Amino acid sequence: MTKAVNKSNRTNNTNRKTEFWQKLPIHIAILTIAFIWTLPSLGLFISSLRPRGDMLSTGWWTVFWHPLEITQFYLGNYGDVLRSSGMGEAFLNSLTIAVPATVIPIAIATFAAYAFAWMTFPGRQLLFILVVCLLVVPLQTTLIPVLRVYAQLGLAGTFLGVWLAHTAYGLPLGIYLLRNYIGALPKDLIEAAAVDGASHLKIFTKLIVPLSMPAIASFAVFQFLWVWNDLLVALVYLGGTADVAPVTIQLSNLVGSRGQDWYLLTAGAFISMIVPLMVFFGLQRYFVRGILAGSVKS
Amino acid sequence: MASVSFEQVTKQFDDYVAVNNLNLEIEDGEFLVFVGPSGCGKTTSLRLLAGLETVSQGQICIGDRRVNELSPKDRDIAMVFQSYALYPHMSVYENMAFSLDLQGKPKEEIRQRVCSAAELLGIEKLLHRKPKELSGGQRQRVAVGRAIVRKPSVFLMDEPLSNLDAMLRVQARKEISKLHSDLATTFIYVTHDQVEAMTMGDRIAVMKDGILQQVDSPANLYNQPANLFVAGFIGSPAMNFFQVERLSQEGKEKLSLDGVVLPMPDSVAKNGDRPLTLGIRPENIYHPQYLPLEIEPMELPATVNLVEMMGNELIVYAQTPAGTEFVARIDPRVNIKQKDSVKFVVDTQRFYYFDREMETAIF
């Protein structure tokens, strides 16, 4: 008995060893790619901790020549960015833009995706194709025409205007992603709910939304990141005035018109990264595997 | 409780006719089983009744209400799906309470009805669990429970046992039959399994290619199949078919089965000169060593191709000298093996004659 166990243990060990050697090249390749991928962020982070003079004269990797010399690191850049006038307001503006500009498209896209996937109405296929076609329209081509309409409607320079713009730019991708996810939910589930007496609205709120949370959360992360990092749309529709400027505009102002203060950008980038990271980890719990387990036999 | 009627119901998908001119009356409190091979239109018929498909032609009534235009939720039906279709994010209790919740029933009544349904099905200990924490048999019960809490006038079941293993299926079959007698409601049940159909149904509707072949009680379906398809579909192993020819012997009309001469029955004589097929069920073919007393014997010489020992019987695959293959269920005490030449005995009282071209039975 013990012998058998020992033997199986040994074969397990040898198996694991050969497996390790077999997979080694893949692991090395993955680690190399991961290293190259993180390198710019690391450089940016180290730069953000160096004083202006050092940054302009030597490369960030020079810190590794005396890694223990704490004095070469300097938090002043972060202080400068945070103390610069309007930074707090810019954060507020960014949130004011990004939260509704994420929530509105999610709401509309989920409703639309359900309709495209599960309701029968004339022209459904054609409409959906149209939405998918919108994915290829570059948003830059729409800036001037939309701005002219906004100017006439009095929406230029308002938050409402920029919410609507982000909603429109985000919807095609959102509808496309969510329709595919919602369309792949088991048909039996939706029919069971219909027989149980649920209207389309009830099916949507009680079944579709809870079961689509993984897809909704991933789209939320996408959309929030895109809106948070956006400079162009905000600059065009809001203008650059301090009372409405988001963090991106504030940072670009900080750097100076000729980019002479770019060392501040390094610290600014990390500060503005905090919010998307919080959003990502906040939504983390919705990325559930096997949300449909147990409902229908596969 | 309500009766159900299909009146000239046709369902067409593009150029494919799934259900063709279905006429069927189902009585209040009846257990009706739709049975047939896959693609025969049995599930489509059920879905038409549930309102999950729209009728192309004809009308469906539940009670005296025409339901063609009603959505599923207004038809007062409950359905058990083949896949169970449990809501994965809800507990068993929430699954069962879902429909009552939508009806806006008071919390206390919902709790009572869910608990009594759970008790009836023996799942009261599972109420707080999620579907993924249940076994296949438990999920099937929850699916049934979700249907019965609603007290609908008609229960629809679409192959609810096909995902269970053989042992559980036998048990669940009995439970559903018992449920039917407890609830005394109309049950409409779809299956491809003739054992389920025979054991559970008050009446069985056999379908093929979208056309209803025969509706009758299990015994009548077995003893008086209306056509070749029903005769071959009901019964396991399936009925044997032989081509028989007419011949004249001593001035009398007779029939010949691969050279064995049979008397001409009156019913067949009346049918004219049309070509004939003879059906014999495997249990009406005997080995000469073990013959019951009450049969009218006739010899059928054959060579054995294969013997399957089932314990309670032998399934013997054999062929006549002319090459027609057939199956017989023989007493297990018989010593019989491959390539034996045996003079089997058939019971001429249990012959089924069919018009070979029209495929209809001749009584």
Image (cartoon, rainbow, N blue to C red):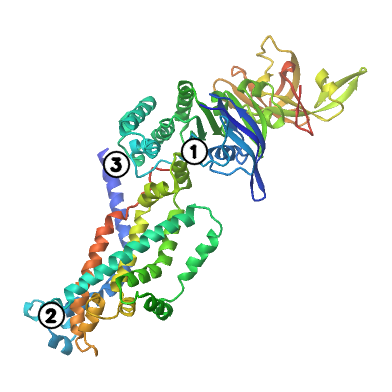
Q: Is residue B131 visible?
A: yes
Give the alpha-carbon distance from disc 1 to disc 2, as whole Å. 67 Å
Q: Where, by quadrant of the figure, is residue A41 drawn?
A: bottom left
> What amino acid is found at the position of numbered circle 3 in the picture?
Ala
Q: Residue A281: x and y, percent?
A: 24, 60
Residue A164's place in the image compared with B270, above or below, is: below
**Separation of marks 3 and 1 at Cα, in angstroms:** 65 Å
Q: Nearer the viewer, residue B45 or B338?
A: B45
Answer few, some or many: residues within 10 Å of disc 3's Cα (few below 14, many 20 plus, some between 14 and 19).
few
Q: Is residue B135 left or right of residue A241?
A: right
Q: Quadrant of the C terminus of chain A?
A: top left
Residue picked out by circle 3: A4
- The chain to which mark 3 is attached is A
User: In the rendered structure, the residue with mark 2 lies on which chain?
Assistant: A
Residue A263 image offset from top left, x and y in percent: 18, 83
Residue drawn at x 30%, y 46% as measured from the top left? A8
- Residue annotated with mark 2: A80
Q: Residue A98, how many percent across, how many down?
A: 29, 68
User: Are labels 3 and 1 assigned to the same chain?
Assistant: no
Instruction: Residue under label 1, please give it.
Output: B74
- Asked whether the residues under the numbered discs 3 and 2 touch, taking CB atoms below 8 Å apart as contact, a structural biologist would say no
Which one is earlier in the sequence, the residue at label 3 or at label 2?
A: 3
